[in-house]
Image (tube, rainbow, N blue to C red):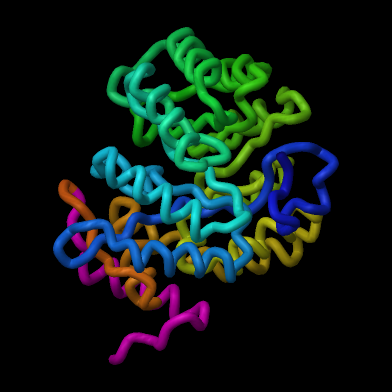
Amino acid sequence: MSGMSGRAGQENADRGRLQGSMTALVTPFTAEGKLDEAALERLVAHQQAGGTDVLVPLGTTGEAVTLDEGEKRRVLKIVRKAAEGTPVMAGAGTNDTRTTIENCRMAAGEGADLVLVVGPYYNKPPQEGFRRHFEAVAEASPVPVVLYNVPGRTGSNIEAATQLTLADHPGIVGVKEASGRLDQVAAVLAGRPEGFAVLSGDDDLTLPLLALGADGVVSVAANAVPDLVHDLVAAGLAGRFDQARELHFRLRPLFIAQFTETNPIPIKAATELLGLAGGGVRLPLTPAADWTRQAVRTAMANLGRVPPAEV
């Protein structure tokens, strides 16, 4: 399941792993708060033009927890059709194993190639609970499962030993690691089986994780600048770390700006600046503050993507 579509990671296709630049898509809303289907199509076209390897709708950045099932199905239908041959990895995880299995089946039925399954939140399961949960999901899912470890959101960490146990399951093909712990990710990289992908879940850690042998990123910033994130990942996978480092430092102000408030508030401000989609979010999130908009505009202007702010 390598490199996908002949882009980033194609040079490493013989590894047989999921690789490349993957965008955690925002879900655009109209001014009335409804799903903006035309904007979603524009966003996918923007990703296609930028060389994105895998599209990742219905995740944290996609505000999936605020979408009803009908909206989730519609998002997947639109992304699947607009994506053409680009693989789709749909967010499907919840804090209930049965509901997660239902989501995986629904996503597969709507054309998803893989599912991204977050560690159960709020419940705070022990490591044995994580193991049993993911194994049950993988046994029932019609498509391969990618684990998603984000303790800052879920309240508990899927430890390296648990990830490595799950990596041996044939239905589990990788992990999106957003713990922010390089020691933990390094332990997974050192002990993983050959076909298990390790993906950065933090834009600003993509470069160091690629240097350790990771396979790519599930990126927030790529909503706005898919071409630059793609080029960073492609350079890292090919061992061109001078180029990857230069791109990392160019992108770093955007990486910082996109977390001045809770994701996806700032990155939606960026897509609005680009004319791709409105910046609206659903409660309990709130629209971007003035300082966030200013930071995002400055970062995007420095990348040459929007005019600088008027003084």
Magenta region includes residue 307: yes
The answer to whether residue 144 is left or right of residue 285 is right
Residue drawn 54% across the image and 47% down it: 88
Q: Nearer the viewer, residue 159 or 148?
A: 148
Q: Provide residue 201's location: percent of width, then percent of height.
A: 51, 43
Residue drawn 28% across the image and 42% down it: 70
Quarter-wise, where is residue 21 in the image?
bottom right
Q: Provide residue 251's location: percent of width, then percent of height.
A: 54, 66
Q: Nearer the viewer, residue 278 or 105?
A: 105
Residue drawn 38% across the image and 62% down it: 40
Residue drawn 64% across the image and 17% down it: 169
The answer to whether residue 1 is left or right of residue 123 is right
**Is residue 249 in sight in this rendering?**
no
Q: Magenta residues, as a range?
A: 285-311
The quadrant in which the N terminus is found is top right
Q: Provide residue 45's location: percent of width, then percent of height.
A: 51, 68
**Is residue 195 in sight in this rendering?**
yes
Q: Nearer the viewer, residue 160 or 2?
A: 2
Magenta region includes residue 299: yes
Quarter-wise, where is residue 264 in the image?
bottom left
**Circle count:** 0
Q: Does 92 appear above or below 58?
A: above
Q: Provide residue 71's location: percent of width, then percent of height.
A: 29, 46
The answer to whether residue 225 is left or right of residue 60 is right
The quadrant in which the C terminus is found is bottom left
Outermost residue, bottom side: 311
